[in-house]
């Protein structure tokens, strides 16, 4: 359905967009009373707008050529890549890892693609879909910002996996300076044994004096 194709919760199966993990459900989220409900994906609209700009540039170049006028330099249409959020939105390493894992999972399930995570010195966090031309260009130009590529489909086939929180936390600690984010104190499992302070017996003070 047309509306499903611009929904954040879409999946594509055999050329047909449908609700995520529900192949038989498409175009009915406003009447069946079930979740998820339609939510517009702003990135799709941005891509469509950029495509129209490119088409307009191509038409202008063709028109200049057909009328034997000096063709104007073709301007490359480049959408400015904006950060997804800032580190100020996350108080701890663990909170950032949870937020990244959620976005990586959303991209994998909705688009079937991996996610490139990059963080610059201005504490801006960038999340880009792996495999896109603009992502490859960003990767090459801002390599020092890149923390890693996650949930990317294996070259030889197989299923992509969303990284666990521990792996993301380790990558964050390696990529960011130690002062950038706090670490939550480690918590013992409820079933774990707590450390026991040893109680060593000492003789009474008068016996120690007598022995001296």
Image: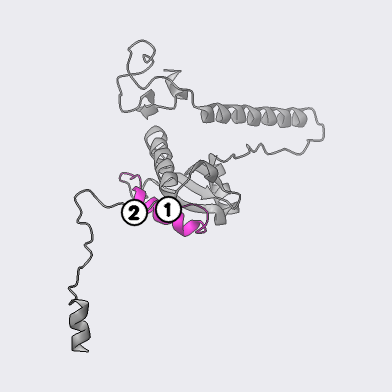
In magenta segment, residue 137: no
Percent position of residue 196, x then y: 21, 62
In the image, residue 175 sits, relative to residue 98, either above or below, namely below
Q: CA distance from mark 1 to mark 2?
A: 9 Å
The residue at 44%/50% (across/down) is 93
Label 2 secondary element = loop
In magenta segment, residue 178: yes
> Quadrant of the rendered structure where residue 198 is?
bottom left
Q: Nearer the viewer, residue 40 or 212?
A: 212
Residue pushed farthest bottom? Answer: 212
Query: Seen in the image, is 148 located left or right of residue 211?
Result: right
Percent position of residue 40, x then y: 48, 23
Label 1 secondary element = loop
Q: Nearer the viewer, residue 175 or 64?
A: 175
Position of the N terminus by quadrant: top left
Q: Label 1 neighbourhood size at 10 Å, few (<14), some (14-19), many (20+)?
A: some
The residue identified by callout 2 is: 186
The residue at 47%/24% (across/down) is 6
Region rendered in magenta: 158-183
Which numbered circle lies on residue 56?
Answer: none
Q: Label 2 neighbourhood size at 10 Å, few (<14), some (14-19), many (20+)?
A: few
> Quadrant of the rendered structure where residue 204 is?
bottom left
Which numbered circle lies on residue 183?
Answer: 1
In the image, residue 203 sits, relative to residue 68, either above or below, namely below
Percent position of residue 123, x then y: 57, 48
The residue at 45%/18% (across/down) is 3
Position of the C terminus by quadrant: bottom left
How is the model colour-coded? one colour
């Amino acid at each position: 359905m047309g509306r499903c194709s611009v929904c954040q919760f879409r999946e594509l199966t055999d050329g047909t967009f449908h609700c995520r993990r529900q192949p038989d459900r498409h175009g009915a989220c406003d009447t069946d009373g079930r979740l998820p409900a339609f939510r517009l994906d702003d990135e799709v609209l941005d891509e469509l707008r950029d495509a129209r700009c490119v088409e307009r540039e191509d038409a202008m170049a063709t028109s200049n050529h057909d009328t034997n006028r000096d063709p104007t330099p073709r301007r490359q249409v480049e959408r400015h890549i904006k950060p997804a959020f800032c580190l100020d939105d996350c108080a701890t390493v663990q909170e950032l890892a949870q937020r990244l894992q959620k976005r990586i999972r959303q991209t994998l399930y909705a688009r079937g693609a991996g996610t490139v995570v990059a963080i610059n010195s201005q504490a801006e966090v960038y999340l880009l879909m792996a495999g896109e031309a603009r992502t490859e260009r960003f990767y090459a130009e801002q390599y020092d910002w890149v923390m890693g590529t996650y949930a990317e489909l294996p070259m030889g086939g197989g299923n992509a996996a969303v990284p666990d929180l521990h792996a993301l936390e380790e990558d964050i600690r390696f990529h960011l300076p130690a002062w950038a984010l706090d670490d939550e104190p480690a918590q013992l499992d409820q079933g774990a044994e707590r450390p026991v302070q040893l109680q060593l017996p000492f003789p009474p003070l008068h016996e120690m004096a007598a022995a001296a």
